[in-house]
Structure formats: structure tokens, C-alpha cells
Image (cartoon, rainbow, N blue to C red):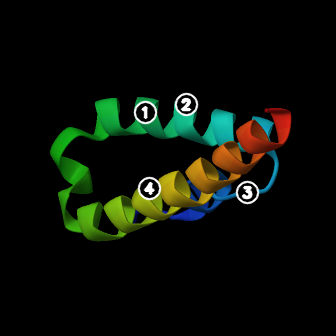
Amino acid sequence: MFQFQLLKRVLDANKRVQEAACSAFATLEEEACTELVPYLGFILETLVFAFSKYQVCKNLILRNLA
């Protein structure tokens, strides 16, 4: 069964952990091919949430630098 621990690390507060998890997930999806299809809903929800969460953080950091 597919373990979602890797996707939890994508949401980690530590930027290095996030980067490592994204890299590992990219490798996993290349190897797994169609085996991830049953989990696409959860995967996409998690990645969209992560993107929106960290995009907001990135924008706040950029505003503080300006």
C-alpha cells in the first residue's frame, strides 16, 4: 500500500525537508507510473495545499525585503 508519509514531509516546516521530499516524490512518480493513479486525488490535494501555503510565505518574505 502507498504510504503518504512522503507527502507529509512536503508540508514540513523545514525547507530542506520539503525540498528533499519533493525530490524523492519526483523520483517515486517516475518509477511508479500508473501505480499512483488510485491516489492522485490525495496527491494533488496535498501538492496544491503545499503550493498555496508556501507561496503565501514566499510572498510575505518578499514584501518584508522590499
Q: Nearer the viewer, mark 2 or mark 3?
A: 3
Identify which residue is drawn at 73% across, 37% down.
62
**Disc 4 from disc 2: Cα separation:** 13 Å
Query: What residue would you read off at disc 2?
Result: 23
Choose between 3 and 59: the one closer to the eye: 59
Q: Would you name the residue on which mark 3 appears?
A: 12
> Residue 61's image quarter?
top right
Q: Which mark is residue 47?
A: 4
What is the three-letter code of the residue carrying label 1?
Ala
Q: How many marks?
A: 4
Disc 3 residue type (three-letter): Asp
Kindly indicate whether the residue at mark 2 contacts the one at mark 1 (C-beta within 8 angstroms). yes
| Residue position for label 1 | 26
Circle nearer the N terminus (1, 3): 3
The kind of residue on which mark 4 rests is: Leu
Type of amino acid under label 2: Ser
Task: Decide if residue 44 is on the left or right side of residue 4.
Answer: left
